[in-house]
Amino acid sequence: MNLKLRFALLFTLLVAIILSFSMAAIYLLYYDYRKEDFYRRLEQQARQAFQLHYNSRISDSVLHALSVQSGRQLYEEQDFIIDSGKQVTYRFPDTSRFFLEFEQLQSAKEKIERFTIGKKEGVVVYYPSHDAYAVSVAYDRVGVLKEKNLRNILIFVCLGAVAVTAFVSFVYARQITRPLTRLSEEISSISESNLTQRVRVGRSNDELSQIARNFNEMLNRLEKAFNIQKSFVHHASHELRTPMASMLSQTELALRQTLQPEQYQRVLESLKEDQQGLIDLTNSLLSLSQFEKIAAHSSWPSIRIDELLFDTVEASKKLFKDIYITLNFIEIPDNEEYLIVKGNETLLKSAFLNLVKNGYRYSNNKKVDLYLKATADNIIVTVENTGRQIPEEERSRLFIPFFRGQNAVGLKGFGLGLSIVNRIIHLHIGTVHYESQGDDLNRFVVEFIK
């Protein structure tokens, strides 16, 4: 069942329920009013019959004939007067048979007794001055007929109103869901082959326009992700193909020729170097893929950033024997708590080690300087080296996987280190960016917002 039909049916059902309760309330109120009015008229007839019977010298038959002529008689009316001896002293018509039990008469001493017999309704009025009872019974033919007519009218009106509501609600639902249908058609036409297509956004600021804008923003993110993925696959396949082709050509050359032991040694060393490159590339690809699946976690432990950087410096010295690396405080923090950040120690250490490695490899003097500044609001770590600077037009692509700038020409690498750094820093709710100072100073700035 589509949304349009569901809306029409639900709205019609709601209106039908409201109308049914309303009509039922009207009918029940009229039903109570009709009975109350008829009981009041019966009471008047009973009192009138009692007064005429006890206070008039005219015979009962004459009195009743006068009542009939005056139009006050009710349909199929029967009147009775019961004396203190529980005897019927008056009845009209004369052929009427009294049918009430003595207990029903007794209850009339406390209040006027009302009763129903078949279609007829009656009242019993007690007169303590005479210890007598006046009883009137009749059928409210006119009232019941009006009640039936009202019931039929209410049913007809209710059914008609429900039918009109169903038609109007279906037309309105079709009209109101037309923008949704159009939006659905536009969305269904978008696939991975035409991610540049966008849905139309209305001029108003209603919910549909907000959905369209949000969907277009999602498409922008998806298009960016797909482009990165395509670039990643393209560069990964290229980087993997190059060393594998080199290894294959060296192996074929060695098989076609008879070489000296020292020549075989050089071939094997070259193959080992290519294999090590493949291993490094594979590890980098696996790391990047793993970091893409990791999300920030609120239960991460607290880490002192200065201790982490000291560990990074020691690890860098072991990794690069000729590196000259320093760690400097821009200013001593007022509180040691300023140096604490929540995070994963292994990931953060990997990020800073990649930055140091990047600074070492692209420096012209094998020197890397680290600077730390910690305040109550943020922690800033700066990694600096001197060397060829990155051109302005290349800086926006620094953190894209496999991108390598002009300063990397002639140096081995895969262009994955900064991508890994960027992902790890973002996992820790931080930012990383590149700055250049003077003619040959390169600076990567990492900032953690508290």
Image (cartoon, helix red, strand yellow):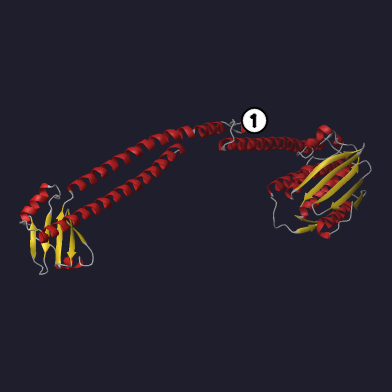
In the displayed structure, would residue 213 be above or below residue 109? above
Residue 398: x %, y % from top left: 79, 38
Q: Nearer the viewer, residue 72 or 135?
A: 72
| Residue shown at 8% from the left, 60% from the top | 90
| Residue shown at 91% from the left, 50% from the top | 325
Give the position of the N terminus as an image quadrant: top left
Q: Can residue 397 be seen?
A: yes
How many numbered discs?
1
In the image, is 23 to the left or to the right of 255?
A: left
Q: Nearer the viewer, residue 216 or 421?
A: 216
In the displayed structure, would residue 36 be above or below residue 437? below
In the displayed structure, would residue 4 be above or below residue 323? above
Mark 1: few/some/many CA within 10 Å (<14, 14-19, 20+): few
Three-letter code for the amino acid on which mark 1 is drawn: Thr
Residue 55: x %, y % from top left: 11, 60
The quarter holding residue 111 reads: bottom left
The quarter holding residue 196 reads: top right
Residue 383: x %, y % from top left: 86, 46
In the image, is 394 to the left or to the right of 42?
A: right
Which residue extends farthest bottom? 85
| Callout 1 secondary element | loop
Residue 338: x %, y % from top left: 81, 56
Q: Which residue is mark 1?
A: 196
The quarter holding residue 442 reads: top right
Q: Can residue 260 be seen?
A: no
